[in-house]
Amino acid sequence: MEMAEAIARAAALLGAGICMGMGALGPGVGEGFVAGKACEGIAKSPENASLITRTMLVGQAVSESTGIYSLVIALLLIFST
Amino acid sequence: MENSVEIIQVAAFLGAGIAVSVSSIAAGIGEGYVAGEAVKAITKQPESRDSVVRSMFIGQAVDETGGIFSLVIALLLLFGGFAVPGGGWQKAAALLASGIAVGLGAVGPVFGAGYAGGQACKSIGRMPKHSNDILGNMLIGQALAQTSSIFALVVSLLLLYTVPNQAADATVGMMILKSVSLLGAGLSIGLGTLGPGSGIGIVAGKASEMMGKFPKERKEIMRTMFLGAAVSESTAIYSLVVSFLLLFIS
């Protein structure tokens, strides 16, 4: 039935929006916190700058993973339901 | 179904109210935090009074920009002549989503910029002779935090100006589909700036604090701040992409 199909598709699109919206919250705050601590560390011991920066980037990449899951689910909801 | 103007007007009023009220929650608390840290800093070191008050005013002014974007969109919604007959549910949903996008989208960046401004005032209070460096870092950090509110403003303006009127032969199903996907576009960027805005604000705050304690490491600190902020901004870009997809595909 056309109406039910449209409602289902509408719910999928709304869900895609909410999914990416809320999914950006965690990685954003977490990566910011890591970067803040990295600034602190580099200021206190600048001779370890490259090690600290490397660790920061690795930590941020891991923290990004759930953000990418949200992006994938949002794209799946938009394009293949 | 209903092709009257009233639905669109209702949506415009709701959108305008949500835009200004939700963003002013963040602006009030953020700017209050800046002022609170400034007062604490002046209590500890009264001779830093001039520099701290100067940076407090500047920090609060930059923090206000998210609220100003919302005010502009709210005034456009009220007086911009969007309530034309024939717009239908689609137009109504676009107007409501526009208010949600810019109102919610200001919360994260404004909170973040408020935290950054407060930490900068605290830092200047401790070290007033480096106040120019710290102030510069504060401005850059706050601007970085506010970039995702610019994404929200862009989506909001697109929702206002590029959504066509409802097709005359649209079925109920198509109306629901299009309206709900526009709401999803608004929610995606509206919620999506919460994280990166606050995260970049935390980085900027820490950078300003460290610049006061270790002023010789100025360049390294600012470089790390940029790098960390750029990575943290990535999820806001994902939200922007999803918003565009929901706006422009049918």
Image: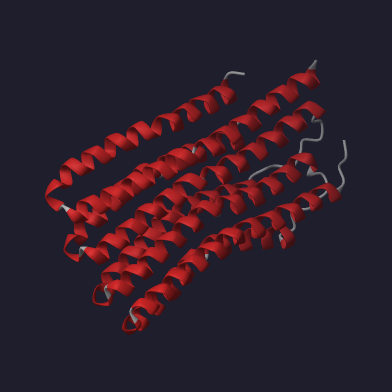
Q: Residue at x 29, y 72 (%)?
A: B126
- The outermost residue toward the front is B44
Residue at the extreme top: A1
* In the displayed structure image, the side of residue B60 where residue B45 appears, left or right: left
Colouring mode (rainbow / by chain / secondary structure / one colour): secondary structure
Image height of B231 relative to B41, above or below: above
Up-down: is B228 above or below B34? above
Kindly identify the residue that appears in the image at 47 percent across and 70 percent down. Answer: B36
Point out the residue furthest to the left here. A47
Q: How many numbered circles does the render carry? A: 0
User: Can the viewer see residue B250 in this picture?
Assistant: no
Residue depicted at x 49% and y 39%: A24
Q: What is the x, y in percent for residue B18?
A: 69, 54
Where residue B158 sits: x, y (%)? 60, 47
Quadrant the N terminus of chain A occupies: top right
- Please state, as top left, top right, bottom left or bottom right, where the C terminus of chain A lies in the image: top right
Percent position (x, y) of residue B138?
Answer: 35, 64
Front residue (pair A35, B144): A35
Q: Is residue B14 above or below residue B61?
A: above
Q: Is residue B250 or residue B202 the one in the foreground? A: B202
Q: Position of residue B150 (x, y in %)?
A: 50, 53
Q: Determine whether, in the image, residue B243 is placed left or right of residue B83.
A: left
Examine the image and state in which quarter residue B41 appears. bottom left
Residue at the image position 80 percent from the left and 41 percent from the top: B88
- Residue B125 visible in image: yes
